[in-house]
Image (cartoon, rainbow, N blue to C red):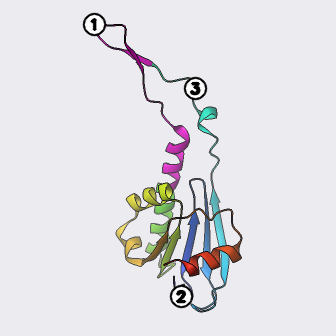
Amino acid sequence: MQMPKDVLIVVADGRKTLFFRNEGGAEHPQLELEGKHEQENPPNRVQKASDAGRSFASGGAHRSKMQETDFHQLEEDRFAAEMADILYKRAHDNDFEKLIVVAPPQSLGELRKNYHQTVRERLIGEIDKDLTGHTVSDIEKIVAAAE
């Protein structure tokens, strides 16, 4: 994927976002970290108060377990919506002209649901990978090799 000079590259997952700017050219990208945003999100087992309840079918002794709320996933979804809002504010302030977003499929889906039209118009690429734990050099190579 071409990374033009000054493109904003957002590398995110459900709890961490890294903001990079390409200070190099399309041929020789050089990503510089502009900032990061993180949230604490402990595992679901830590966040839930108790196990899911049970429901009883009328006319019999049949019981079924109610679906548990995944608080960890809810926080990841909320974090993605927050990131989409940050991107909108930055786009509205003309902080970037072009945008590439890299995130795992679940997070990318939540971001897409929350993109404002202004952000969509500046989006030149999306990559469905989790790269938040990779080095800057690896991110440059993976983004450049993506189609």
Would you say residue 72 sits in the magenta stretch?
yes
Q: Which residues are magenta?
A: 54-80
Closer to the camera, 35 or 71? Answer: 71
Find residue 137 and report its horizontal and vertical position in percent.
70, 77
Give residue 72's quadrant in the image.
Answer: top right
- Look at the numbered discs 1 and 3 and tell me whether their residues touch, using CB distance below 8 Å: no
Q: Residue at x 61, y 33 (%)?
A: 45
Q: Dot 1 lies on which element?
A: loop
The residue labelled by disc 1 is: 59
Q: Position of residue 62 (x, y in %)?
A: 37, 12
Left or right of 27? Residue 119 is left
What is the C-alpha distance between the residues marked 1 and 3? Answer: 31 Å
Q: CA distance from mark 1 to mark 2?
A: 66 Å
- Mark identifier at residue 4: 2
Viewer-side label of 1, 3: 1
Residue type pointed to by label 3: Ala
Verify whether residue 59 appears in magenta.
yes
The amino acid beneath tag 2 is: Pro
Residue located beneath label 3 in the image: 49
